[in-house]
Every structure is written in structure tokens, then in C-alpha cells.
Image (spheres, rainbow, N blue to C red):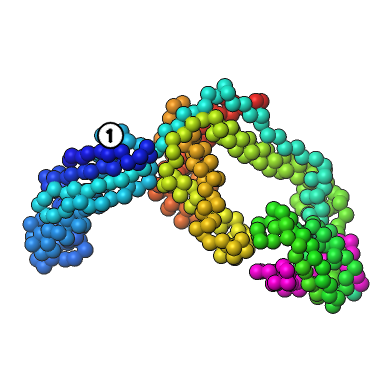
Amino acid sequence: MAYTKTTQKKTEVELTITVIPSEYQKQLERAAERLSLRGGIKGFRPGKVPFEIMKREVGEMTILQEALEAIIRESFVAAVQEEKLETIGMPNIQIEKMAPGNEIVYKATVSLLPQVRVADFSSVTITKSEKSIDEKKIDETIQALRGMQANETAKTGPAQGTDKLIIDMNMTLDKVPVEGGVAKDYQVYLGEEHYVPGFNKELVGLTTGEEKMFSLVFPEGHYQKMLAGKNVEFSVKVKSVFERQLPEVNDEFAKKIGQPSLEELRNLIRKNLESEAKKKAEQETEIALFDALIEKSSFEEIPDVLLDAERQKMFFELKRDLESNGVSIEHYLQDIKKDEKQLFEDFKAQAEKRAKAALLSRTIAKTEGLAPTEDEITKEINFLKENYKDQPEYLENLKKPEVRDTIASMIQNRKVIAFLKEKILIK
């Protein structure tokens, strides 16, 4: 195999690779065997047809086309290894010359992993994020648990206190119906906060059969961007009102939830809230670590293949989050009046930051010797097997090489984060 290398730009090279017949003969023989397994040749068992017979029966060009992918993969990998190139993504292949019994010539254009100059750790200091849990948060959780244990009785009087209402609702913006703004048999609990501030207050005093129109400003951070910060008109009709009798907060209440006493219940809630707060604080600290390092480190130009991969991940993450809230990506795009292409453009800045964080993590792992061992990967896989032993599909996925690679990356990232916390985090 021979090749020449041309640098297209800092993050891209073009390899012109030539493979002569004697170098790809074994690939032709394997291809002929695969073809013989698919279509039988009279007088021969599948997979046992001599190579010369297969050439005569199906044609040399058919065998060469069957073998081409393997020939390119093997020769491309060999050239990359010889040049010690760190490539990312799949190469763009252009066949220059291909004929039976002749050399194969093709061009492979591939992106290179950009070089990173990591900032001096002594120049970066981050204070660990802390989240405190006060008694108010525990009280709010207990109130929510009370609501789950409430007895409900239909009433004819006005809605008040902790009552529940069943309503039909229509929302309009500038007198235009809001997409997804029609709700039938919508439940509203007066004792709980509504996602639109002031909504519950508008329903206090209403009785069964009563109608009301009012307008409220949606929160600035609402996921429906078209409604965020906008004054939306509501039209509601009360279909029924229920008085809710909430249990007293005492030891008996705690026992119904599975705890021996109210004190034990509060301790359990506090422990769970502290665990959630600690996890959130850790996430915020990790983000701050990488943000600070990105700002003080230097990067070569980030190739499009990396940015596009991150944007694709962000798109699927958004889609998953929307669907968990009962909103389709199509409706979301309609609400923000954008298509997927425009959304991908919006992701560009965040995708670049994510790509830089991944490059930093990879570079630090390499320079500090933080790559996971085979034993660590196997241990993690065995842990996952035990936890998902009742999910055959998940267990089958664990056998895939790409899943093993993902697990290895996850372990490596954990090691890098632990290393950075030790180096630059102010305790």
C-alpha cells in the first residue's frame, strides 16, 4: 500500500491511497465466500465454491465491489496509524480508480482531532457549590404528601382553601388560539402552586358551572418560548369543585406513608432532599470547573464534525425532555417559529463549549494517565448487568463494542473530574 498526504486545513487532511491487487487478494477471496453463501452455485455447497469458479459465475467486478468496503477500511486504518493521525468521524471517500486486476486508488478526506493547550491548573480556582436544605422545603414536601392522602367530596359552594377544581380551559394570545391551549377536564389544586403565577387565585370563589375570563403573564423561563413572558388570555368553565380533607400531620400520618413516626418521616425527607441538593451542587461545580478551564485554555479550530455531533446530542436531549412533559418536538418548533435547521444554528455556541469540554477531558486523561483499565470497564459492565438483569434488551446492548467504548469514556470522564477537583477546587 502506498499513499500521499495533503493538509487541507489545520483540522483536515486528504490521503490519496493506492492498493495493488496482491494486497487486496485476501479481501477478494473473503468477498467471494460471502457471495457464495448468499446465492448457491450448482454443484457446490454454500461457502465452498472455489474462487476461480465464483469469478466466472458472478464476475470479477461484483466480487471487487463486495470487497471494496473492507479494502478501504483496512488500508485507511493502516495509513492513519503509520502517520500517527488522531482522526474523528468517518472519512469522506472518493474512488479515483477501480478495475479488476488493477490497483485501487481512492482519496480519503478526514477531520483531525484539534490540539488543546490546557491551562496551568494553578491559574484556575473554583469554589465548590453548596446547596442548603431548610425546614420550609421539608414542610412543602409534607404538604405534597398530605395532598396525595386527601379525601375528596363534591361541593356546591365556592372554591376555596385547598379545594380541587375540574375545569375546561382555552388560552389565546392576542385573540389567537394558543397551540395546545385547549384543555378538557383540567385539574387544579388551590393548595398547590400553578406553573402560571396567579392562576389559582383567579379560580378562588368560583362555583360549579361558573365561567370566567382573565389574563396572566407566563413565566420568562417557560419552555414554550412563544408564550414566555407574554400576557395570555384564559377562558375557564368550572365543571366541578371538590372539598379536600387533608390528614393531620402527626405520627399516624407518617405511619400511613411507611415511616414509624413524624420525626422519622421528616428525617427521611431531609436526607432525600440533601442527596438531591448535593447532586445538583456537584453538577454545578463540574460545569464551573470546565467553564473556567475552557476560558484559560487554547484550542485549534473545532471541526464541523465535532460541532455537528454535539448539536445532534443537544437536539435529542431537548426532544427527550419535551416528550417527558408531553410536548412533541414538532409543536415546540411551531411555538418558537423555527425549523430544525434554525434550531441547530441556535445550538452552535453551546455545542462549541461542550466540544471543548470533551477535548479538555480527553487531553487531560491522556497527559495525566487517567484512561480506564480493562478491569475497571469490566467491573462497570458487571455492575450494570446486575442492576438490569431483568431487562434482556439492555443486557444485549452491553455486548456491543460501541457501548463498551461509551462506558470506557464515562469512567474516564469520572476520573478526569475527580482529578480536577483535587487540583483546582477550593475546599
The residue shown at (82%, 68%) is 214
**Residue corresponding to mark 1:** 83
| Quadrant containing the N terminus in the rendered view | top left
Q: Quadrant of residue 232?
A: bottom right
- Indicate the position of residue 401 as horizontal and vertical percent values: 38, 46
- Indicate the position of residue 262 as horizontal and vertical percent values: 83, 46
- Indicate the position of residue 172 as horizontal and vertical percent values: 72, 70
Give the answer, above or below, for where 128 lies relative to 112: above
Q: Secondary structure at mark 1?
A: helix
The residue shown at (17%, 49%) is 104
Q: Magenta region's main secondary structure?
A: strand
The residue shown at (79%, 54%) is 144
Any magenta on residue 182? Answer: yes
Q: Amino acid under label 1?
A: Glu
The furthest residue to the bottom: 209
For the magenta stretch, what is the residue range?
157-184
| Quadrant containing the C terminus in the rendered view | top right
